Image (cartoon, rainbow, N blue to C red):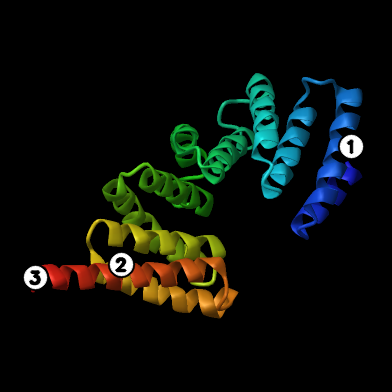
Amino acid sequence: SLLRVVGSVQNDEGRFEEALQTFLEVLRIFEAMHGVDSLQAASACSDIAINLKALRRHSEAEPMLLRSLELQRRGRAPDHPETLNVLLNLGVLYAEWGRFEEAFRWYEEALPRFDRVMTPDHPETLNLRANYAQTLAELGDQAAAVGVLEQVVPRLRERQGDRDGPTLKHTVNFGHSLREVGRLDEGLETLESVAHDIAEALGDDHPARLSALRGMAKVHERRSEFDLSRS
């Protein structure tokens, strides 16, 4: 509907409170026209959840996404793109919320389906796999995270270039994980390079660049500790 287009524009412009109210009205209309269990209602629930997530209202976004997933599973094939999108958004929601075990579970369910439907080299699949790797890192398995990111980050940079925001963020995470497994030289080189790219693409004060700079400082601290232990 036209109202849903208006909500999408508001979302794209970062006007999340306005978009939320628009999509709540869309949901009310869709429920009245098509029923509370309709696929149209499922799509509206997803739209609402995305804006709630952007507003950091995770506990309100969660039931909306779960409702959307239930309705999508009832009315669509398991690998339908809209169903896959809800799985991805559930993983992202729980990761942003700090509930990494749940994020891991949703990413793990989504990955083979994205591989089948989108193909392994599709940017959405690569970004999903990088998110999965970051969840592994948050759960303490830095070695596994490095193993995934070593494959994914070069492919993302080849496909998306060195000015793509998500790709730059994943590259920063790769540098952090290299540091955590003791590959200090590679970690420092990765973080220095991506800090430069972020400054050019997104600005000196972007949070991803500040994260890269903090990571570089930690590498130097590790080296100093190592040098002291040998003296």
The residue that appears at 71% across and 48% down in the rendered structure is: 55
Please provide percent x and percent y for residue 197: 48, 76
The residue that appears at 71% across and 39% down in the rendered structure is: 49
The residue that appears at 43% across and 51% down in the rendered structure is: 130
Q: Earlier in the sequence, mark 2 or mark 3?
A: 2
Q: Earlier in the sequence, mark 1 or mark 3?
A: 1
Please state which amino acid type lies under the numbered disc 2: Gly
Q: Is residue 37 above or below residue 59?
A: above
Report the quarter where the C terminus lies: bottom left
Residue density around tag 3, few if under 14, some if 14–19, many if 20 or more, within 10 Å: few
In the rendered structure, are the residues bearing label 1 and label 3 in contact, judged by CB atoms less than 8 Å apart?
Answer: no
CA–CA distance in space, label 2 to label 1:
48 Å
Please provide percent x and percent y for residue 104: 44, 37
Please state which amino acid type lies under the numbered disc 3: Arg
Please provide percent x and percent y for residue 124: 53, 50
Residue 118 or 49: which is nearer the viewer? 49
Please state which amino acid type lies under the numbered disc 1: Glu
Residue that numbered label 1 is attached to: 25
The residue that appears at 65% across and 22% down in the rendered structure is: 70
Q: Disc count in the image?
A: 3
Residue that numbered label 2 is attached to: 187
Report the quarter where the N terminus lies: top right
Which numbered marker is on residue 230? 3
Q: Is residue 125 left or right of residue 35?
A: left
Residue density around tag 2, few if under 14, some if 14–19, many if 20 or more, within 10 Å: many
Residue 28 or 192: which is nearer the viewer? 192
In the rendered structure, are the residues bearing label 2 and label 1 in contact, judged by CB atoms less than 8 Å apart?
Answer: no
Which numbered marker is on residue 106? none
- What is the secondary structure assignment of the residue under circle 1? helix
Q: Is residue 1 above or below residue 77?
A: below
